Amino acid sequence: MKTFSNLGLNDSICKAMQQLEFDSPTEIQTRSIPMILQGKDIVGLSQTGTGKTFAFALPIIQNTDENKFVQSLIICPTRELAEQILLEIKKITAKIQGVRAVAIYGGADMQHQVYSLKRGANIVIGTPGRIMDHIRRKTLKLGLVHTVVLDEADEMLNMGFRQDIEEILRNTPEERQTIMFSATMSKDIMAITKNFMHSPTTIQVGSPNTTISSVKQSYFVCQKDKKKRALHALLSELPRGRTIIFCNTKKMVDSVQLYLKKMGFMALALHGDMPQSVRKRVMNEYKSEQNNLLVTTDVAARGIDVKDIMHVINFDLPQNNEYYIHRVGRTGRAGKSGNAYTLLNTPEQIAEIREIEKKTNSKITASSLTLDGYATETTPTQNKTRGKKLNIKSREKRAIIAGHTTGSRYNNRININGSSKRGTKKRTLRKTHQTKKQTRIHY
């Protein structure tokens, strides 16, 4: 059986991996680590969830000395992924002297990052835009960098970072070692390998542009105006477990989260418009299992490395094959099984999912849902007769039960026990919920 010590890693790193309960390397680690330790340029093509982070992080740590200048630069597409890589490196280097890693990304305090860099970071992990900001400010100097890693290269190119990546590479020494990891191969990636890498070796684990075989994939067809009901029905039928729901837009993330809360599901939301502090809190809640249901855009498709994700649900059909691969790749990691579901509502989308099935070399089966008995969003009926005496108690009780108290003109005046009082909304809501035995579902 292969061990980490067989790959040429030193005792300190092998002991750290043992303490983290990683006994044997994955295939991508076995094939990549010895070549990276030798200083060779590589292009690693591997499905997500196969251990790519340790494949480049372990040799980088070993090749880092105690000098307080930037020796290795890791470029990744999202702040969540930058934080995740930093966390993994800190776990390994907890008892290793002289290695200091720093993450720099947009949405965080620039002055704090400048201070961290000035203290002497020898490994820097960052997103392309923020790395460029620091280069322009001259707070990040890359003249002595010997290793550059492009992690999730295909996603960075999809997000429009090609110009930034090329500019960053031009600011590093030409004789550097360049390492690229990606789940898919595209023309843009091939162009970068040709222009900025030195005779790279391609290491391919599994077939490129494919989904993980351990993930069971299905799709459901429903009317567009019943998609949320279909989602409600699906969540109600699935076994309880950590779940991610993907939407294509930030607006839809907020809409789906609001609907699920009305239906009794405690759902978290994550998208790019949220402040960094909120995004960090959401991820901490999700990782610590305080809440197992997350609604998100593709910003999280690459940045979440959470164990034991049981279900991935595409509320919206992904925009391309690569997004589908990376969404599905959030489950079925490290050899475990998982489930992926997609909601469709037009013949064109059915044709698209069949095309994705063909191009990703996967099996996506058609399934059905029964929507009978599952609630849908409703709008409270407005009273058409102005000035007419209203039965406030009756109307508010119905509104509360339906979950539509917000925005009502009667929020501040609710009839309790035959008397009209102000400022009693919370007490009334609590009482009504207890009466109707309504409970929140912690998914």
Image (cartoon, rainbow, N blue to C red):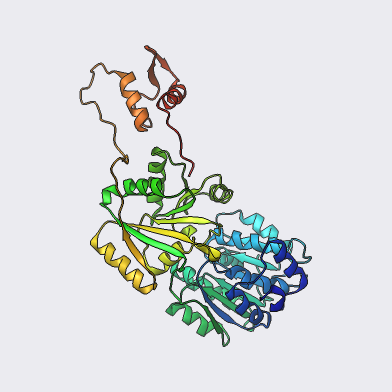
In the picture provided, is 17 more to the left or to the right than 227?
A: right
Q: In this rendering, is residue 105 above or below 254? A: below
Q: In this rendering, is residue 287 above or below 85? A: above
The residue lying furthest to the top in this view is 419
Q: Residue at x 68, y 83 (%)?
A: 38
Where is residue 238 shown, x and y percent of the image? Answer: 42, 50
Query: Is residue 100 at least partly visible in the picture?
Result: no
Quarter of the image for residue 387 reads top left
Q: Nearer the viewer, residue 111 or 330?
A: 330
Give the mark count: 0
The residue lying furthest to the front in this view is 1
In the picture provided, is 64 more to the left or to the right than 442?
A: right
Q: Nearer the viewer, residue 178 or 315?
A: 315
The residue lying furthest to the bottom in this view is 199
Where is residue 101 shown, x and y percent of the image? Answer: 69, 64
Q: Nearer the viewer, residue 193 or 398?
A: 398
Q: In this rendering, is residue 3 above or below 229? A: below
Where is residue 169 shown, x and y percent of the image? Answer: 57, 76
Where is residue 24 shown, x and y percent of the image? Answer: 65, 70
* Quadrant where the N terminus is found in the figure: bottom right
Quarter of the image for residue 346 reads bottom left
Quarter of the image for residue 160 reads bottom left
Query: Is residue 333 at least partly visible in the picture?
Result: yes
Q: Residue at x 32, y 45 (%)?
A: 229
